[in-house]
Amino acid sequence: MTGEFFAFFILAICAIGGAVFMIHFDRVMHMALSLAFTFFAIAGLFFLLDAEFVAVIQILIYAGAVSILMLFGIMLTKHQEKEQTFTRTKLHQWLSFLFALGFLAILMSVIYLAPFTLPAGDQSLYSVNKLAEQLFKSGYVLPFELTSLLLLVALIGSIILAKKEEKE
Amino acid sequence: MDWLFYIIGPILLLGIMLGFVTYAILFERKVIGWIQNRPGPNQVGPWGVFQTVADIFKLLTKEDIVPERADQTLFKIAPIITFVPAFLVLAVIPFTDRIRFADLAVGLLYYMAISSITTMGILVGSWSGNNKYALLGGMRSAAQMISYEIPLVMSVIGVVMSAHTLNLTKIVAAQNEVWFIFPQLIGFVVFLIASIAELNRTPFDLPEAESELVAGYHVEYTGFRFAFFMLTEYAYIFAMASLTTILFLGGWQAPFGWTFLPPLIWFILKFAVIVFLLFWLRGTLPRLRTDQLMEFAWKVLLPLALFNIFLTAVLKEVPWIQTFYR
């Protein structure tokens, strides 16, 4: 019973709880917020694994940027609006249950088949500088640059599309 | 003793921050009063020292009103979501080489990541109150904070390239010969402007432009919930001034080897200069328009920040000059 175990337990419950509430709530704003909470808990799990860089990026991109973008869109919806509830048939429920069960089975089998026999590596070797070296000095430069180019094209494309709408 | 430091330390830091907020508000009102040729607060206590204390007391004893049509839960959580990140970011700030809490390898990124959560609190607070002026203020605030976060992060890349690290302690250590404000002058100017915009202060205080929007995103808030929003703003001044000191003014390092003052005093002196600069700018400049604000971020600050990155990369390779860039 170490502190790490407790921290993992609390963070895992937070992550799962956020996800469950995200499905359970019927107002979009609440859903988006509980999703952000899940992202935050996952960042905490990364911190627990000594993966500081990934954890911080998780907060920056998911808990910060993606969530705020969602909230920004949702803010313009009606205040008291609730998601339409529709009655599910018995067949629908059974089919959903079967699919969920099947997915769980596949997931568990993959986890059990994975060879986790090696002892954990020394985390202190995986610093930010090492990460950068891996990225830029061992042949991943070209894919990295191409990805950034793709993102730039997407950005400019969205600006052009927005400009077009303005003219009409 | 170490564990004691980690328990008492944060509580002490919270106390220091609250003390700073109390007297920063008084100092700000005094400075602006001085700029505008009026005395400023001078009734409560000698020289108005207890003015802010009285103001806070008033806020805390006010009736707590939650609007009937508001989203009750979110309305109550929003001030917490807004304030908590403002205190969390202080965890990575090294005040001296010994007074610091978490020595993260990615301290700088941590600051940027956590501070972006506050925008979420502001958005939730403005939406949950069910008030159109608050909503407009919240939209403006989110748009502004997202836009200015990009030049803010871009402008410090030059510093990271020179210091070869994201760790704030090591960034200070890299400045023992030349402060980064000199080789990174463009970066410093962009950072300063973007940080004022991030702090939602004049001339970028559009989210709470009282002449257009009543009071901005916190229209519906009263009493201690409102106090939390104000506290967040001043807590961020504390954090941002500390960060500016660390990134560009050499942190706790003494200039010209004047080590007769302890490192903490040097830190406080530099920090105070930045805080004064923020108040000075507020007393001097008028407010921008929304469209001017956005154009300024995307068409002036972002290209400048990119140019600074490019310049740093080029000058790092030029003989003699490169000694200033490492």
Image (cartoon, grey):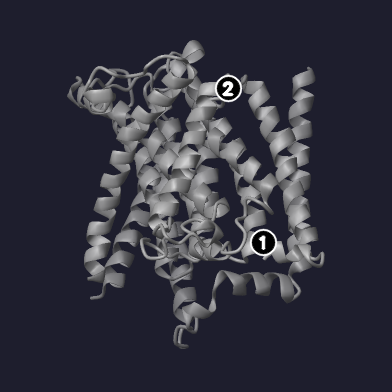
Q: Residue at x 72, y 70 (%)?
A: A136
- Where is residue B165 drawn, in percent x and y? 58, 65
**Quadrant where the C terminus of chain B lies?**
bottom right
Query: On the rendered structure, is B48 left or right of B267?
Result: left
Instruction: Name which quarter of the figure residue A30 lies in.
Output: top left
Task: Give the number of the disc on residue B161.
Answer: 1
Mark count: 2
Q: Position of residue B64 (x, y in %)?
A: 22, 22
In the picture, the quarter occupied by the N terminus of chain B is bottom left
Q: Nearer the viewer, residue B203 or B270?
A: B270
Residue for point 32% across, 44% down: B17
- Within 10 angstroms of label 1, few (less than 14), some, or many (20 or more) residues? some
Residue farthest to the top?
A: B211
Residue lying at the far left of the rendered structure: B61
The residue lying at 17 percent from left, 23 percent from top is B61
- The residue tagged with tag 1: helix, strand or loop? helix
Query: What numbered label is drawn on residue B285?
Result: 2
Instruction: Please tell me which of labels 2 and 1 falls first in the chain.
Output: 1
Chain hosting mark 1? B
Query: How far apart are labels 2 and 1 at the CA level?
Result: 33 Å
Q: Secondary structure at mark 2?
A: loop
- In x, y percent, where is residue A53? 53, 64
Q: Is residue B17 shown above or below A11?
A: above
From the image, state whether disc 2 or disc 1 is nearer to you.
2
**As rendered, which of B98 and B308 lies closer to the eye?**
B98
- The residue under the point 43% across, 72% down is A108
* Proximity of marks 2 and 1: CB atoms separated by less than 8 Å: no
Q: Is residue B201 visible?
A: no
For badge 2, the amino acid type reads: Leu
